[in-house]
Image (cartoon, rainbow, N blue to C red):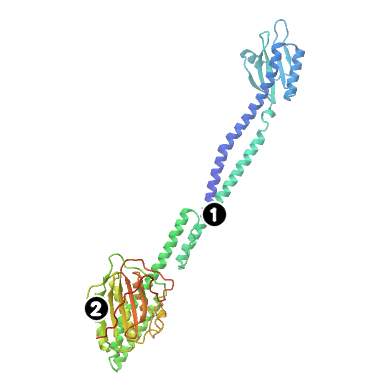
Amino acid sequence: MRWALVRVCLAIAAMVVVAFAVPLGLVIKEMARDRAFSNAEREAAAVAPALSITTDRTELEKVVASAGSNSGADSGMAVHIPAGDGEAAVDIGPQRAADKDIATVRKLGRASTTEVPGGSVLLQPVALSSGEISVVEVYVPEAEVSNGVGTAWAVLAGVGIALIVGSVAVADRLGVRMVQPAQRLVEGAHELGEGKLGARVPEEGPTELRLAAVAFNSMADQVVQLLANERELAADLSHRLRTPLTVLRLNAASLGEGPAAEQTRTAVAQLEKEVDTIIRTAREAKPQTVAAGPGAGCDAAEVVRERMRFWSALAEDEGRKVRVAGVERPVRIPVARADLVAALDALLGNVFRHTPEGTAFAVDVHNAEDAVIMLVSDAGSGIRDPEAAMARGRGSGSAGSTGLGLDIVRRLAEATGGDVRIGSSVLGGTEVRIWIQLDGREPERNGHRGAVRRRRRGRSAPTFNRSRSLP
């Protein structure tokens, strides 16, 4: 592209120089010729007054000599006076023009030029007092006709060459300015194709290439986001398998002793280990939060009732007391049903996984004006480091934890502009509070994703009566 642009500019500059320099050179040559013959006409005009007064040879020779010395010419003028009234013809100075040319000028009565060896002559007719026509001949050498033309042509050629060289240099710089961004775009595309997802292109150069760089960077960001979302989806789907695995593990623990029971417990443990491996492998990418689209949502009360029927059966087997509140009336939230189910299963699965048998737990749903608050509480030993528990991939520090469950809950809340907080419950253990925003505000972004969020200024959380006892 660079050299093609240089060749195009070279051709255009050459055509422009030829189109202007050649006519200008011819005009300069013509101007030099006109200047030479204008000088010759002035010399002839200087002799005309004397011819109209006298035809005396001696006087005319002085006038011719004087005119020749004033013009700087050396024997470049001649005067031809025809014979008449008994007087002979008079010729002063060297004659270079042919007799027929002189006779033609005398007959026509107007000036003429004719070519002679070494140059040209101007034949100027002048009327005498006797009525006859004399002819003044002024010699114009070829050197005087072309005087200064060579210098002017050389200057024109230099200007033309400088113009061509300058245009080539400018075209080369423009080519570099266009080619380098294009080369960087190609290199970035190759790097992205080789799997280097951090490859980006500087947004510089001409407008079209800047737009191409912006489009490329946007595409690269979308590729990274899509890959991250795919890994997130794989991690979330794998984590959802932990809910039935928890049930299998609890049921296997109640099978008693025997080879079949031991093989079942071993198989369940191995399956749970493999699921944990899948989750740890998939969660390496940075997760992306995607809010529910327009019209998406579910009835949180109905979802809580349905999931608590499932977990209540397990709780009864382990002697756990369960309390559910706030699900008597529908509670619409802008969260997909599957996502809310996954979040509830993650929190309740943690209760069963990380608290001893017989530990009570509760689920409360509170419907405020601009938010829905869901509380999952237990009577266990609590979480020693809530901030670490919220950090993706670090877990609560308990054995067998992937740390993905709380992250699923946090992303669900942040997708609506809400948040998740961990604290102490009235039951004596851990309380996970999920704040789901209802007013459609944009999800907030926090540079420290694992940090437990402080309460927003200017908005206090609703206060609830948590003094109710478990049934």
When asked about the image quadrant of residue 71, the answer is top right
Q: Element type at marker 1? A: helix
**Residue at image location 59% in from the left, 37% down from the top:** 21
- Checking the image for residue 262, the label placed there is none
Please rate how many residues cluster around mark 1, counting C-alpha atoms within 10 Å: few if below 14, some from 14 to 19, many from 20.
some
In this rendered view, identify the residue nearer to me: 389 or 67. Answer: 389
**Residue at image location 57% in from the left, 37% down from the top:** 20
Q: Element type at marker 2? A: helix
Report the mark closest to the observer, 2 or 1.
2
- Residue at the bottom extreme? 257
* Residue at numbered disc 2: 305
Q: Amino acid at mark 1?
A: Val
> Image check: 126 left or right of 231?
right
Q: Amino acid at mark 2?
A: Arg
**Residue at image location 41% in from the left, 82% down from the top:** 385
Say whether disc 2 or disc 1 marks the residue closer to the N-terminus: 1
* Residue at numbered disc 1: 176
Rendered location of residue 122, percent (x, y): 66, 21
